[in-house]
């Protein structure tokens, strides 16, 4: 077996919460001397500095970005599990703006905070669009998996959108850290008003639970 497909659920407290993220892995003939080749199903969206529209995953462990020592692939110690955990924990994190090369120096500084918040808002919007693409064109073999996931998660996605729009938190379990700290910007509020009807229609079409409360 040299072809694998991995699906991850966006972690809570991140802009990627509740969405699905698909990655295809190919093990080259030289594996494990060389790392797997990884393709991200981006749908043409750049929702993270490490995940390109082309599907490239920029990560030291994959030798697609510079790194030292344990950051790069090792035939003796690296594994597929390490790749998957690195993408989940280091890429799809709560502050993706700082993943951009050189921007880690802005962590904790007012300048970084000022830019990181709107970046998170944009990542959140692109994550909602990713959900729509997945429902329209789910990766082959995962059609029912995608539908079943959003049948159960759809109401929580809509509830999070509603929390942003209201500017206050009615249920902490369905809000991100950024949501709890401040209301959304006027730009995000306008974008959510535009995206929510189509998102609600997509969830309703697959029979998602609890959508009626948002109609």
Image (cartoon, rainbow, N blue to C red):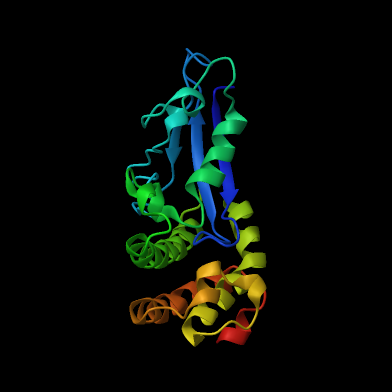
Look at the image and tell me whether residue 200 can be seen. Answer: no
Residue 83 location in percent, x, y? 54, 33
Residue sitting at 59 percent across and 22 percent down? Answer: 1
Residue 188 location in percent, x, y? 38, 76
Look at the image and tell me whether residue 83 can be seen. Answer: yes
Q: Which image quarter: residue 56? A: top left
Q: Which image quarter: residue 175? A: bottom right
Residue 126 location in percent, x, y? 40, 62
Q: Is residue 101 above or below residue 2?
A: below
Q: Is residue 5 left or right of residue 115?
A: right
* Foreground pick, 36 / 79: 79
Q: Is residue 2 left or right of residue 127?
A: right
Quarter occupied by the C terminus: bottom right
Q: Which image quarter: residue 169? A: bottom right
Residue sitting at 64 percent across and 59 percent down? Answer: 149
Q: Is residue 185 above or below residue 63?
A: below
Task: Kindly give the residue lying farthest to the front in the view shown.
Answer: 109
* Foreground pick, 25 / 89: 89
């Amino acid at each position: 077996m040299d072809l694998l497909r991995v699906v991850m659920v966006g972690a809570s407290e991140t802009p990627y919460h509740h969405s699905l993220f698909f990655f295809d892995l190919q093990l080259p003939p030289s594996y494990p001397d060389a790392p797997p080749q990884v393709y991200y199903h981006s749908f043409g969206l750049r929702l993270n500095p490490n995940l390109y529209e082309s599907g490239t995953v920029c990560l030291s462990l994959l030798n697609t970005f510079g790194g030292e020592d344990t950051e790069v692939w090792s035939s003796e110690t690296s594994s597929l599990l390490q790749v998957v955990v690195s993408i989940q924990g280091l890429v799809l994190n709560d502050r993706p703006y700082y993943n951009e090369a050189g921007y880690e120096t802005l962590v904790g500084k007012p300048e970084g905070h000022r830019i990181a918040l709107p970046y998170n808002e944009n990542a959140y919007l692109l994550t909602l669009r990713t959900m729509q693409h997945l429902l329209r064109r789910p990766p082959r073999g995962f059609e029912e998996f995608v539908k079943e996931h959003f049948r159960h998660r759809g109401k929580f996605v809509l509830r999070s959108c509603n929390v942003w729009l209201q500017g206050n938190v009615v249920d902490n379990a369905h809000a991100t850290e950024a949501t709890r700290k401040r209301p959304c910007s006027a730009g995000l509020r306008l974008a959510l008003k535009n995206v929510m009807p189509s998102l609600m229609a997509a969830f309703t079409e697959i029979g998602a639970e609890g959508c009626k409360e948002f109609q």
